Image (cartoon, rainbow, N blue to C red):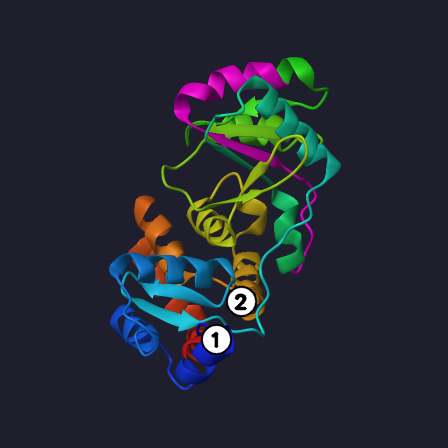
């Protein structure tokens, strides 16, 4: 009949974490498990949101009290997504709205940005494609030197669309839609980007940033291995670890206990 999810929860429920070897030993109580068998077992458990990675060789059960981050996809966002797919359906990209952070913050930001992140060689082409197809203002924001562009144009525009470069290996989530799927950033990416960004997301910095992290940690499932891996690609993993430990030590201890 096979090992059920409940059996796994009963077996490891008393442990904070368990190793890949312990997981294999657990499965081998029923039959011999090859490395391939274990790979697909772990894949299935993660897909069902039963376990998540702590690091490359360690796992923990998902706290069922925490929810998965599932933002509302607005009609406007879906329209931009269709135009991106119209341009190139095989392109690496992600798209999201800054007002997703409003549900985690105390004050509501006045401006709502649609942020489209693309591979660097596609930024210019998609910028002109969206510029020609949309009535909203579209901006290409590619360097930190674009501060004047932010102050004089982007923050003065109504519901602007921002085109920027994507960080390689960014954690994304694919959501099936008709006629095209949509790729959005995972919560871990949004939080890291917020921590690193002192310009585009400035409305959510300071006390707002602290509130956003606090609510995200207490309300949603967060894969900290994914978060720190992405932060490392942005050269901010050490600073992020220090920030989380300083501001949310109690919350993190409650999660990991």
In what quadrant of the picture does the C terminus appear?
A: bottom left
Q: Is residue 223 magenta?
A: no
The reply to whether dot 1 and dot 2 touch (C-beta < 8 Å) is yes
Where residue 80 sits in the image (x, y, percent)? 65, 28
Q: Is residue 126 magenta?
A: yes
**Residue in front for this viewpoint, 125 or 50:** 50
**Residue 159 in view of the camera:** no
Where residue 134 sits in the image (x, y, percent)? 69, 19
Segment colored magenta: 106-130
Residue pictured at 52% horizontal, 64% vertical: 221
Residue pictured at 45% horizontal, 30% vertical: 92
The residues tagged by marks 1 and 2 sit, at their Cα atoms, a distance apart of 8 Å
Other-residue count near label 1 (Cα within 10 Å), few / some / many at <14 / 14–19 / ≥20: some
Q: Which residue is mark 1?
A: 251
Q: Residue furthest front?
A: 1
3 relative position to 96: left or right: left
Element marked by disc 2:
helix
Q: Which residue is mark 2?
A: 214
Q: Residue furthest bottom?
A: 14
């Amino acid at each position: 009949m096979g090992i059920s999810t409940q059996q796994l929860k009963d077996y490891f429920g008393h442990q904070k974490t368990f190793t890949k070897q312990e997981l294999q030993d657990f499965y081998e109580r029923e039959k011999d498990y090859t490395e391939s068998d274990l790979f697909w077992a772990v894949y299935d458990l993660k897909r069902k949101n039963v376990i998540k990675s702590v690091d490359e060789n360690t796992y923990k059960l998902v706290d069922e009290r925490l929810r998965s981050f599932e933002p509302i996809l607005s009609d406007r966002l879906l329209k931009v997504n269709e135009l991106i797919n119209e341009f190139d359906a095989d392109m690496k990209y992600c798209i999201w709205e800054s007002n997703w952070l409003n549900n985690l913050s105390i004050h509501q930001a006045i401006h709502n940005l649609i942020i489209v992140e693309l591979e660097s060689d596609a930024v210019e082409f998609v910028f002109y494609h969206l510029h020609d197809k949309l009535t909203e203002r579209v901006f290409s924001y590619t360097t930190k030197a674009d501060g004047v562009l932010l102050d004089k144009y982007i923050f003065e525009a109504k519901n602007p669309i921002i085109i920027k470069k994507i960080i390689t290996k960014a954690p994304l989530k694919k959501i099936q839609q008709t006629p095209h799927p949509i790729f959005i950033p995972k919560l871990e990416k949004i939080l890291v980007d917020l921590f690193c960004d002192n310009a585009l997301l400035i409305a959510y910095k300071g006390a707002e940033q602290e509130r956003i992290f606090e609510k995200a940690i207490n309300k949603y499932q967060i894969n900290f291995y994914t978060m720190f891996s992405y932060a490392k690609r942005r050269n901010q993993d050490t600073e992020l670890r220090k920030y989380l430990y300083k501001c949310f030590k109690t919350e993190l201890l409650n999660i990991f206990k």
